[in-house]
Amino acid sequence: MTHLLRSAPWLVVLAALALRPATAEERAPFRVELDAALVALRVEDADGDGLDDLITLDAQRTLSVWRGQRDAGPATTPTWRHKLAADVAFVALEATATPPGYITIGAEGARRHGWADPTPRPVAGASNLSWTSPAGALLTDLVVPGTGLLLPTPDGWRIERPSQPAWDVAVNPARRVTPAGPFLEDRATLVTAWSTPFVGLAPADGAGPALWWVEGTTLNARPAEGDGAAWDLGPLPVGATRTLRDLDADGRPEVIERAGTNQESHYALARPVVRDGKQVLDALGGFRLAGFQLDPEWVDVNGDGRLDVVITTIPIHGSNILRTITAGRVTAWHNAFLQRAPGGASAFPAEPDGVVQSDVEVNIRFTYAGTIEVERALTLVADADGDGDGRLDLLCREGDATLRWHRGTAEGVWAAEGVPVPIPPRGASPDVPAYAGDLDGDGRDEVVLVYRAPPGGREAVAIVKLR
């Protein structure tokens, strides 16, 4: 007890240091300039050491990794830098492999590469995929934890499992014709695409993994063994979309339908189940939001293990339109809907649980075709835990050189007042995309900012600590 009392002043000092605002030197960002235009960027663990890394893919087809370092942040130079073959169409990280590395898919099929030794090794059962990409490689998710690899094929998808036979699932591609533009060179083109699949558990318990996908108006589930199942989703309204997300972490997806216009959107949710031998869609309610909307971000805001949703809307009304013309800014609303516990009539409330407003820079351009284009410059991060409390925070760029940090709270969603965090000025970059990850192993996320360059310039990546 005496020792504890004697150390109390030091405890007070340590607490004060922990609560004080960070100095400019402590927040000074890590910054690197890239040798070529950035094609893709990821912030995740690339080598299985538990620390997030910075992974970039540039226009010269160079895959680079700045490895995260405990208590130090990312390495100041790339730890690994590999040149991709000209035929590579897809690249996926494989951090849990032995040794850790990445997978490429090209004309010769799928190949594994280690970070320390990039010599390609064939992936069993995936030698006849026949993919080439003259336009450049795509950094994507192909590794399914606990299942294996999800590999695109010309006819659909293949799932390759360790020490088990691979299985192929034929998926009919969706073909659509793009509308012709106002100029002669803007001819209509035919676009072929496959539905984004979901790899999870089969509808029946104990049936192992299954591939889920939407084809037309039908939701399909195809397990590796046994019969599949199909649900009739009904006709899709013009302009509406359907996506699959595992909202309740049970290994099976829910169906999210989004329909509406530039001024309002409606979200409807349903859970596909097999009940008494029949395929049934259990309605999970929905909600409406007014205004022009950015794509929703499905993240676990409050740390309860279930996905919530953050949707940014820009109200279309007189004052916002006037601000666009006179000030080049509009007011955006960042809305958070928290998922309710299972068993209720609706998975989400009709009104958002939390709302934060911020300014978004816009630039209006009048084209030769007589149309109006509106360019947005928005920096938004909804999946960062900057203070390590298990709740996600919201970060919005304010002006050219400040992030507004709204911490997650136990009483609600986000703090109404945000803490200003200095960042490098936007400069000539048309926008500043941002990502979050723990690159130094302290349990608190950093923010990764991407600064685009005009033709002939060098693009840069900056990492800012939230302290």
Image: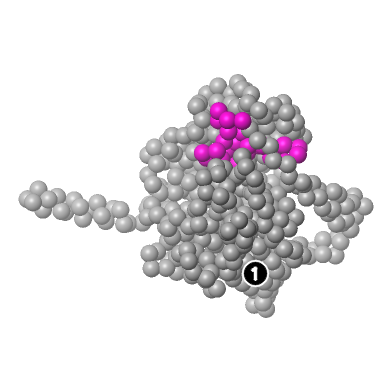
Q: Is residue 224 left or right of residue 421?
A: right
Which residue is drawn at the image coordinates 63% and 58% (left, top)?
Answer: 279
**Residue 382 shows in this picture:** no
Q: Is residue 116 left or right of residue 57?
A: left
* In front of the other: 347 or 219: 219
**Residue 290 location, x and y as percent?**
63, 73
Which residue is drawn at the image coordinates 92% and 52% (left, top)?
Answer: 184
Query: Can you say whether 445 is above or below 407 in the image?
Result: above
User: In the figure, residue 105 lies in which quadrant?
Assistant: top right
User: Magenta span has 168?
Assistant: no
* In front of the other: 217 or 23: 217
View extreme (front): residue: 276
View extreme (left): residue: 2
**Residue 288 location, x and y as percent?**
61, 72
Which residue is drawn at the image coordinates 7% and 50% (left, top)?
Answer: 2
**Residue 411 location, x and y as percent?**
38, 68
Query: Can you say whether 289 is above or below 221 in the image?
Result: below
What secondary structure prevails in the magenta region? strand
Q: Which residues are magenta?
A: 141-165
**Residue 226 shows in this picture:** yes
Total numbered labels = 1
Query: Can you say whether 254 is above or below 89 in the image?
Result: below
Amino acid type at image mark 1: His
Which residue is drawn at the image coordinates 61% and 30% (left, top)?
Answer: 165
Query: Can you say whether 212 is above or below 356 in the image?
Result: above
Q: Which residue in the protein does label 1 denote?
A: 266
User: In the figure, residue 359 lies in which quadrant?
Assistant: bottom right
**Residue 97 location, x and y as percent?**
51, 30
View extreme (right): residue: 184
